[in-house]
Amino acid sequence: KKVKMAATSFEEDEARRQKEVIEQTSFDLDNLNQDGIVEMMIDEKEEIRRTPAMDLAAQIVASAESIKSVGSDYVKKNLWREAIAEYDKALELLSKEKSKISADYESELLAEKCELACRNNKALCALKLMDWSLAKLFCAEGLQVQERAKVPDASSKAKLFISSW
């Protein structure tokens, strides 16, 4: 009888623990957005405060985006080598300042997106220059970025370029 009582007590304790876990993790279904993600309101007091390091990270990524835009302007003018040079400058800045960018998660995601765009755009330029080996190299670099990305960019066309070889 003692063994049976202990088993029953254990089962009751386990059921109580499971109920507590469910109560702690349950959400009001009214808070689900259209993607099925729970949206929760944060009190203004609990709002995330931006730090100077976070602001610096955002400025660095904005600078890289600006350099990338210059490269894109060169692409529009069919100046492929100049565009590659600008994309390289943006990539160099992102690489050099990676530790500072890591201070802000949002900036890290934007930096990844910028890096992937630069690498894919470099591949496009190499294709336009008919430098197939360089295009393949740039595509491979883009794929490496995409594989380690925190949020993979589904719009990336690097796989299409490299799969054609």
Image (tube, rainbow, N blue to C red):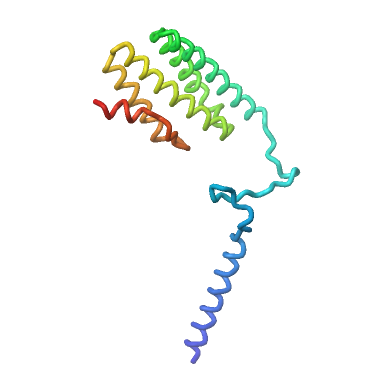
The residue nearer to you, when weighing 47 against 160, is 160
Q: Position of residue 9 (x, y in %)?
A: 54, 81
Residue found at the very far bottom of the displayed protein: 1
Q: Position of residue 56 (x, y in %)?
A: 62, 24
| Residue drawn 45% across the image and 11% down it | 76
Dividing the picture into quarters, in which one does residue 141 lie? top left
Residue found at the very far right of the displayed protein: 45
When the figure is inspected, residue 49 is found, relative to residue 120, above or below; the finding is below
Dividing the picture into quarters, in which one does residue 135 lie? top left
Dividing the picture into quarters, in which one does residue 20 lie? bottom right
Residue found at the very far front of the displayed protein: 34
The residue nearer to you, when weighing 125 against 142, is 125
| Residue drawn 62% across the image and 30% down it | 54
When the figure is inspected, residue 34 is found, relative to residue 111, above or below; the finding is below
| Residue drawn 54% across the image and 51% down it | 36
When the figure is inspected, residue 61 is found, relative to residue 44, above or below; the finding is above
The residue nearer to you, when weighing 109 against 53, is 109
Q: Position of residue 102 (x, y in %)?
A: 54, 31
Task: Say left or right for 118 vs 42.
Answer: left
When the figure is inspected, residue 15 is found, relative to residue 73, above or below; the finding is below
| Residue drawn 64% across the image and 27% down it | 55
Give the number of callouts: 0
Q: Position of residue 163 (x, y in %)?
A: 27, 29
Task: Say left or right for 113 vs 135.
Answer: right
Q: Quadrant of the C terminus?
A: top left
